[in-house]
Image (cartoon, coloured by chain):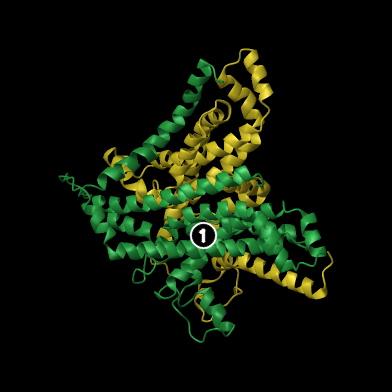
Chain colours: A green, B yellow
Amino acid sequence: MLGRRQLREKWFLLAPAMAVLALITLMPLANTFWLSFTDTRISALPTPTHFIGLENYIYALTDPDFQDALFRTLYFTVVSVGLEGVIGVAIAVLLNQQFKGRTLLRALIILPWAVPTIVNAVAWRLIYHPDYGALNSMLYQLGFISDYRSWIGDPMTAMHMVILADMWKNFPLVAYVALAALQTVPGDLLKAAAVEGASPWKRFWSITLPWIAGPLMVVMVLRTIEAFRVFDIVYVMTGGGPADSTKTASFYVYQEYFNYLRSGSGASYAVLVAGISAVMILGYYAAARRQSQGGAA
Amino acid sequence: MRRSLLQSVLLYACVVLVALFTAGPLLWLVTMSISAPTDLTEVPLRWIPSEVDFSRYQTLLDLNDGSGERFLSALRNSILTAGGATLLALLLAVPAAYSFSRRNASMVLLFAFLATIMMPPITYILPLYSTFSSLGMLNKTLTLIVVYTAMLLPFATWLMKSNIDVLPIEVEQAAFMEGASTAYTIREVVLPLALPAIAATAMLSFLVAWDEFFYALIFTNDLSAKTLPVAIADFSAGRVTDYGVIATVGVMATLPPAILAICFQKFIVSGLVAGSVKG
């Protein structure tokens, strides 16, 4: 047990960190919550602010554009993280084999992760360029398309193009976590299953995948939380367009704040987004706790 | 296990595919940055440059050139912001981590720390913006450093805590027996032992700050504080006639993190894996 001096020290050592977090996160969070019940607007002149109860929330919850933005964000999150999971595990399985150049390929995989988010967005925007983009040129020269397309100028394809770009940057994290977990799968178990005649496919589904499921789950929930707040890549690649087809929840709040200058109403959207994030964060802790109690990591 | 010829061919086909998928977009970015402007507007594209042209790199590193000035000041701001925030975050994270590890501070509190960075920044942005605006602190590197410190702090604390956990406690106890203060013990006993962990934490923190866009977009508006991500977004949104310039800025902004990531791969990967899996 801690002595009195140590107890005092416990808080003394924590105090600076807690003060910074309180100032930069806790207070703004509380302030956003308060704003969401008011009709505050951003303006150069001081304008009177009124408490208007749940009015913003009633509006927000019945706002079809916001619902669309939420569904779009959900779609982006599920597809992007789902693909990262599948591709990440597939690449991890590959990297876990013996082959020439394995060390090099393992090192190569870190590069997309190291590319800054904004550079990634800009690079893919160039690749998708309707007239001079590499994607059009490549597909045309390979004979897959006969005419150049406006990949991010078309509401039907824009979101999928953003997802592809986001997935390219973020699959390495999942791949590395899956690889680390794969290396703990006992070889004896796999050998025994092989001797008993289980096919590689069956061995993967009934031994390997369950073995790595814990850590994989944790990293996928973490990626879900990150993907849900997507803003940067959308801002640079499409600006939310075309025809709002890539306008995500964070982007919606951003516009409500900084384009329409409605901070009260924007805050109510922000609180709703935060609420959904909070549920996911609790999910992350549940997954992480089960993982650390389960032992293998 | 032995592989048949077919299996080997399939395996190496997959290897090539993954390598192309991973490196392709980056190789193309580099190629664009050294292609002649006319090569980049051919239809269909000329994949291999007709001549190698490094002039864009020269331009961007020239302070007397308009885009060079924009790039170099953004580079300076990014280094100052990410470096300053990393330093401050570590300074606050080490004592906090020690408290979590050796003074029994509640894990619930550590989870609360981590929850603050998992929330979307959109929940904090407006009150921060109003406060900084009324204090006259918008468009300042210092403001970004403070915000980034809060952003890096939880993860740094957590990473340092799990590293202090595994240090032998006997050495510290011996120091306390000799009458050393806690501050002295952290500085002289814990820090030297935790040096590799501090280096890994510093690197990951720096990379996170280097990558940050949203706060920088809202809080800065000219050369004096804009960081690289914001400058790159500007370059890309502007009326640029030569796409190679955008590619060049992208390559230059990627170089520092890419070099760090390649050189310290083991460090970074183990930090990442631990950071995303353990709760």
Looking at the picture, tell me which residue is in the foreground, B14 or A141: B14
The relative height of residue A180 versus residue A164 in the rendered view (above or below) is above
Q: Quadrant of residue B238?
A: bottom left
Q: Is residue B1 visible?
A: yes
Q: Which residue is mark 1?
A: B250
Q: In the depicted view, which residue is nearer to us: B180 or B207?
A: B180
Q: Quadrant of residue A87?
A: bottom right
> In x, y percent, where is residue B225?
40, 46
Figure check: A226 above or below B91: below
Depth check: give the residue in front, A226 or B253. Answer: A226
Given the current orientation, which residue lies at the most extreme bottom position? A146
Q: Position of residue B158 (x, y in %)?
A: 55, 38
Q: Is residue B80 left or right of residue A243?
A: right
Which residue is at 42% across, 76% downward?
A156
> Where in the figure is residue A246, as x and y percent of width and height?
39, 66
Which sits in the foreground, B63 or A205?
A205
Q: Is any atom of residue B64 visible in this view?
A: no
Quadrant position of the N terminus of chain A in the picture: top right
Outermost residue, left side: A48
The residue under the point 63% across, 58% down is A175
Label 1 crowd bin: few (<14), some (14–19), many (20+), radius 10 Å = many
Furthest-right residue in view? B2
Position of residue B249 in the picture relative to residue A29 (left or right): right
Percent across and percent down for residue B161 are: 58, 34
Task: Say above or below: A189 vs A86.
Answer: above
Q: Residue at image x 49%, y 43%?
A: B82
